Amino acid sequence: MKSLFLWIFMHWMISHNKFISLETCPILCSTCTYANETIVLGGDFNCALTELDKWGARSMELKKLVTEEINNLIIAHDLIDNWRANNLNLQGFTWSNLSMKIQCRLDYLMISKDMRSSLQTVKIIPNVFSDHSALGLSLSFEEKQVQQGPGFWKFNNSLSTDKDYTELISKKIPKFASEYHEVTDKGLIWEMIKTEIRVATILFSKRKAKEKRDKERKL
């Protein structure tokens, strides 16, 4: 099984106005060789993803756009927050201020859902040399556990006749083009717009499928 390990430092991205969309990362683009491998994504996300991930901190509304982008990335690449999945109702923090009055879980290790069967342990490890705790992740790969990855993404042609989808994309394309107006390489702009369309399409398809399942359950 091939796996792609990525590490991000969200504070730098936000402070340098780079956080348009994590999907614009070239290595995650649909045209990249590694785009369809299993993924281990970690780093300092610099924000709590749920109310359980903070104590005494400011309202999550202040970073609503950031958390939405992170959640979109998780959905688009079928990732899971390992620590939260194993500790559904438990509070755990990786950062605190000196007074300990504010504590947050800012650091994460996400893995592809296909790797869930290989997960042994994930834990927060206190670190005396930093204001951030370390994260420990243990994976065990055995031949019998190896599963096929998500494979290459293919556009569902039936969406081209879906009025809701076509209206959504028609509104988003000018927005995507505006976001990258400073990029001079037209080829790169086109690749970035295609990546944004891919993410929007995946999210739309998953939402549509969920609505269909919910409707069928009520019948």
Image (cartoon, helix red, strand yellow):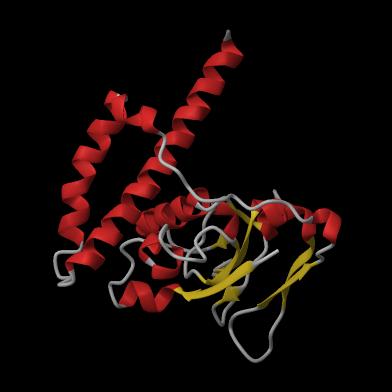
Residue 195 visible in the current orientation: yes
* Rendered image quadrant of residue 146: bottom right
Q: In the current view of this chain or complex, which residue is farthest to the bottom?
A: 129
Query: Along the line of sight, which residue is nearer the eye, 69 or 198?
Result: 198
Image spot of residue 218 (x, y percent)? 58, 12
Q: Work out whether 99 lies above or below 68.
A: below
Residue at 35% x, 30% y is: 159
Total numbered badges shown on the rendered structure: 0
Q: Is residue 87 visible?
A: no
Camera-nearest residue between 92 and 186:
186
Give how far across and how far down residue 145 sits, in percent. Answer: 81, 55
At x 55% / y 21%, what residue is drawn? 214
Image quarter in which the C terminus is found: top right
Q: Is residue 29 left or right of residue 113?
A: left
Q: Residue furthest top?
A: 219
**Where's residue 196, x and y in %?**
32, 53
In the image, residue 97 sits, relative to residue 84, either above or below, namely below
Q: Quadrant of residue 213?
A: top right
Looking at the image, is 99 positioned above or below residue 104?
below
Q: Quadrant of the N terminus?
A: bottom right
137 left or right of 55 in image:
right
Which residue is depicted at the point 30% across and 53% down?
194
Q: Position of residue 168 (x, y in %)?
A: 26, 36
- Indicate the quadrant where residue 92 lies: bottom right
Please tell me whether residue 119 is drawn above or below residue 97 in the rendered image: above
109 vs 130, nearest the viewer: 109
